[in-house]
Image (tube, grey):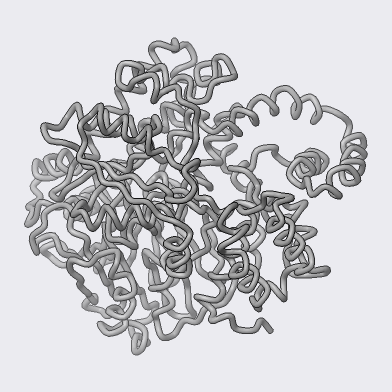
Amino acid sequence: MCGIVGIVAFSTNQTDGIISSNILQRMSDLVVHRGPDSDGQWISRTNTCGFAFRRLSIIDLSVAGNQPMTTPDGQFCIVFNGEIYNYLDLRKELEDRGHKFKSRTDTEVILHGYEEWGAKIVERLSGMFAFAIWDEERQELFGARDRLGKKPLYYTFASNFFVFASEIKSIFAHPKLTKQINFDEIPNYLNFGTSSNRKTLFDNVFKIPPAHCFRLSLNGKFIVQRYWNPFSQVGKFESITFDEASQEIIRLLRLAVKDRMMSDVPFGVFLSGGIDSGLNVALMAELMDRPIDTFTVGFKELAKYNELEYANKIVDLFKTNHHEILIDHKDAFEILERIVWFEDEPNADPVCIPLFFLSKLTRESGTIVVQVGEGSDEQFVGYPWLLRDYKFYRRVWKPFNQLPNFVKKGVYRIGKQIFKPFGQYLPLDFIRRSANNEEYYWSGISIFSPSEIDVLSVENGTLDISQPWRYVETLHSEANRLIKHFDFLQWVLFTEISQRLSELLLMRVDKIGMANSIEARVPFLDYRIVEFTMALPSKIKVPNGNTTKYILKKAVENVLPNEIIYRRKQGFWAPVNEWLRNPWFEYAKSKINNSNLFNVLFNMEYINNLLAKHHEGTINRGFHIFTLLELALWYEVFFDNQKIK
């Protein structure tokens, strides 16, 4: 797990001030947290490409594993962030083809794999990755981001050069680049809690989307294309039985957990006390002859948010070496602005706060690698609101959507009169979506739906409330390119892996984990599991329509006790409702009201009314206020709260 940086100059005659060891060093120093063990820079013979690297040593801890890494003839050079779990199999195949290796790293396997198979190497990799390879002979850059987007990869173009990095802050450490805000992405942030999967809140800074690779030539030609189709197994399991599907799920999970135990440094598990993290512990315990290191975070003052009782049941059952930390609003307050800097872009998920302390505890214990439970809820319909959406879509949305358009628009006009006065913007937005012939499911739950953003925005302002739908429409078009027909749950999973999982959940794991120099691995998002669950018929995933994670729960009944499997889902959260009602209220109010960004974009009367009602306790809008606070802090941290012209 590492931090990578790269620059490509489009003209060999104009590289002064664009590529140098000092510039590369400055850019990589900003992400020292991603790789505190060593660093390195490399500049091509033609001076048209430069790489920088920060290393967190996981596999082959010797200097032979340092990067940037080149082939013996100097034609190819790589910087790589991530882990490849099948690298030993690929190495054996490459050795049989005559390749010689100097290290025991997966990095060198990708390098020689590209030399042997070209761009096809990405289709052979099982793991999490973001990498770039320079071809000195062709004067060409090739790179890729893993199938589910576990590792980030950002880039930008200037007039005569290209820059990429693991974190956006590294990009703007280049002396010829300046930051500007991307106002088009603010509605996406307000709705989804993060930016979309191709753009960022920084103007002209983009993401390589999950499951995509790119190629850049010196004439500036830049091609980004998808290399993985998550629907590739659809149609193969139409006649599968429930028992067969259950057995295949546990088989794939055992394989995924085993693959992710590859490490030359200590590893453990983030333990919440739920089925997902408990399953990580149980399946690791089957393979280990020593106690597993487990890590849990809780809250000192608000025990209702804690899952410590159930976490300790798993600790006792599997005799783990357990570590626990309790935090309160004072602890959390001290890191608010620091977290925003590590995030690069505002992430509206309050879980980033307890996750920071959990990651810090893990690192201080000497553990460098952890397995986490992200990705299970989306595949197995684990959130109560997903089950609600599944029922609502079939019973209400589909019949309502068949009504004539003039009827739906009439209902919308009536709905505005009913819902708007009471601040019920989410149900109003579902009616609006139908009246405008938009998709029902947009990934996650809208924080500020377009119906509320319309009220939140200053009159005649710059916020375009159609942006979230335009983005969702591109996802729908992409799904249609990948498969002819898909059902509602396949659409849900596709939107989740395209947006909420990759850009919110996985980025909180990556950015906050890396802030404390630890690596997080995600067994549930092994691409083979995702391909299988994507292909399962809905009748297998939700056979009774009433139980979350029904098939997963049945699949692991012989692995975990029923009191863990069938306990009521609590979820990993942070008590922002309470913190923003009392101890953080004045701070949040001040930051929001004194933000130059807010005073240009937003209806401050509406926001202050929201703040006041939450403070009084007449409504619970802590999540929404936290979303606004994150945006205000991000603007302050990255733009020094400068005035907007």
Q: Residue at x 60, y 60 (%)?
A: 582
Instruction: State whether residue 81 is above or below residue 10.
Output: above
Front-lying residue, 585 or 157: 585
x and y percentages locating residue 412 in the rendered image: 87, 41
x and y percentages locating residue 73 in the rendered image: 12, 65
x and y percentages locating residue 427 in the rendered image: 76, 40
- Count of numbered circles in the view: 0
Picture quarter with the C terminus:
bottom right
Question: Does residue 125 appear in the picture of this structure?
Answer: no
Instruction: State whether residue 550 is above or below residue 93.
Output: above
Drawn side of residue 26 relative to residue 550, left or right: left
Picture quarter with the N terminus:
bottom left
Q: Which image quadrant is residue 190 in? A: bottom right
Q: Which image quadrant is residue 67 in? A: bottom left
x and y percentages locating residue 517 in the rendered image: 27, 60
Q: Residue at x 31, y 80 (%)?
A: 26
Q: Which image quadrant is residue 288 in? A: top left
Drawn side of residue 286 relative to residue 436, left or right: left
Q: Residue at x 48, y 25 (%)?
A: 549
Question: Does residue 416 appear in the picture of this structure?
Answer: yes
Q: Residue at x 25, y 67 (%)?
A: 54
Residue that lies at the very extreme toward the front in this rendered image: 301
Drawn side of residue 240 relative to residue 358, left or right: right
